Image (cartoon, rainbow, N blue to C red):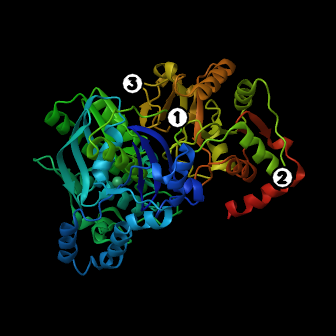
Amino acid sequence: MLTLGFNSTHDCGAALVEDGRIVFAVEEERLTRCKHQGGFPARSLQACLDAHGVDWADVDAVAHYWNPRAGLLRFGWHVLRNLPKSRTFFRRQPGIWSHMSRLPRRMREEFGFEGEFRHVDHHLAHAASCFFPSPFEESAVLTLDGTGEWTTTLMAEGKGTELRVIGRVGYPHSVGKVYEAVTQYLGFRPMSGEGKVMGLAPYGEPRFIELFRRLMRVDRHGRLRVDGRFFEYQYGRGTKYGPRLVAALGPPRRPESELEPRHRDIAASLQLRLEEVALELARRLRVMTGQRRLCVAGGVAFNSVMNGRLLRESGFDEIFVTPAANDSGAGLGAALWVQHVLKGGCERVPYPPPGLGPDFDEAACERALTAAGLRASRPADFLAETARRIARGRIVGWFDGRMEYGPRALGHRSILADPRREDMKDRLNARVKHREGFRPFAPSVLEERAADWFEGARSSPHMLFVFPVKPERRGAIPAACHVDGSARVQTVARITQPRYHALLRAFEAETGVPLLVNTSFNVRGQPIVCTPADAIETFLGTDLDDLALGGFLLSKEDLPNSAVSRRRAVEEPLSR
Ligand SMILES: [Fe+2]
């Protein structure tokens, strides 16, 4: 049975599931080259079929990650009750609902697809995206996001191919929306800059924690409650925080302006409160279900510091966080929901290793190099040579195999650097990434060595957990260690990622350190590279030292003059 799942608002994408097995998934931004691309993911949908060599006639069902009819009455009442503040919703929501309701027709018109079309409850799609491909036969399930239809938080229990809903939290009581609003208050882009706030938090002191405890609380019935008097997001307004929050915390930070100690303290307080709320919800869920394992999804599950605390302190023995926790993962979950629940169930298949997207073989890499007028070497000791270059302090663009699904680069479209160098963070930022200086860089580590370097380390193949670096090791990997001595760790197993594992082994042989700094292969404001041509363009447009493309190695020193002038042409827009 073939089911296509997709999401159709922000960060859209599509995924193909065959008999419970996730076979392909891609986000539209990687194909259109427009970061956070939203709307109808026409290219991703077609790419799923093309990559799997099937036709629209072979697709049994298409699943959409949102049910436009769900929660309509409650939403309508909410809007009426809050007029005139909520009038923005009148302008915006009908367009969104009509876009979603017309999707079956659009599938017919655009692709000639006449088969079954299902709108799936948003949080059930999130829950399905984490439980069904999890390694657990049964578990508790927690989903947290901004909102999906009327739901912001879902608590459930999964057994085999069944998911039983235990409780829901309704809009506007949303940890995701509060985090989004404070992200905007702190001068970062909401629904994009939340990771920056998480990265900023360890620089501050949580001196506003009592305020945040009043803003977000879990009542005696276990329900999340937000004090809406401090926010405006619930009225659909562009500014998501309210005057009362400004009165309590001071003026909001203008984007790109200097970060003051107060801003860091606000980030620290928000982050701490999120962790407290998530821990409380998880502990209650553990008591309610009696389960020893937990699955987590929803956009908030990208908060890897929260995940690390859930792993250590919630009382669950094991936790699985789905790699595409956000709404593109809900598209995948919608397809899984249709197969496992609506179609009567099929075998559950564990989440595949990183790399669910487009693949490009050596010949495709060679063609892209030729098209760019570049000649690259193909050393026999390719991995050892790449490791040697990184050990010499060079920054390498690493392009290998299928592209990752979800926002983390996991050794397929990565920029790799030496974690031992004190100045590497600044060099990466100045020369390639152009990110805020306070943001940390994350390490990939050989799975079998992780416990030697990180406290309480567990398998973390998708870089979704933060662990403390062992104090005696911190000095050895300054570029991979955050200001509080923590790191967002990716563990790399030989069996699932043999080539990346071999590169880490080669680097260990060279340096004695089984880790690499691994950051996504893109520059600020652009999506992660997808094709060899994207990789070459980013290589030429930045101060990356080397490009490892398939089995080819290319250095900046080897570039012909024509490529250097092209590099300048590409670089100019980036520096504006
Ligand atoms: Fe969501």
Which amino acid lies under the numbered mark 3 shown in the image of this protein?
Gly
The picture places residue 530, in percent across and down from the top left corner, at 62, 48
* Residue 510, picture quadrant: top right
Disc 2 versus disc 1: nearer the observer: 2
Between 215 and 59, which is closer to the camera in this rendering? 59
Distance (Cα) linking label 1 and label 3: 16 Å
Residue 294 in view of the camera: yes
What residue would you read off at disc 1? Answer: 481
Q: Residues within 10 Å of mark 1 (few under 14, many from 20)?
A: many
The picture places residue 409, in percent across and down from the top left corner, at 55, 41
What residue would you read off at disc 2? Answer: 563
The picture places residue 126, in percent across and down from the top left corner, at 33, 47
Which amino acid lies under the numbered mark 2 shown in the image of this protein?
Ala
Distance (Cα) linking label 2 and label 1: 35 Å
Between 576 and 330, which is closer to the camera in this rendering? 330
Q: Which of the labelled discs sits on residue 229, or is there none?
A: none
The disc, 2 or 1, on the residue closer to the chain's N-terminal end is 1
Which amino acid lies under the numbered mark 1 shown in the image of this protein?
Cys
Q: Is mark 1 within 8 Å of ligand 1?
A: no
Quadrant for the N terminus in the image: top left
Quadrant for the C terminus in the image: bottom right
Between 157 and 171, which is closer to the camera in this rendering? 157
Q: Secondary structure at mark 1?
A: loop
Circle 1/circle 3 CB separation < 8 Å: no
What residue would you read off at disc 3? Answer: 456
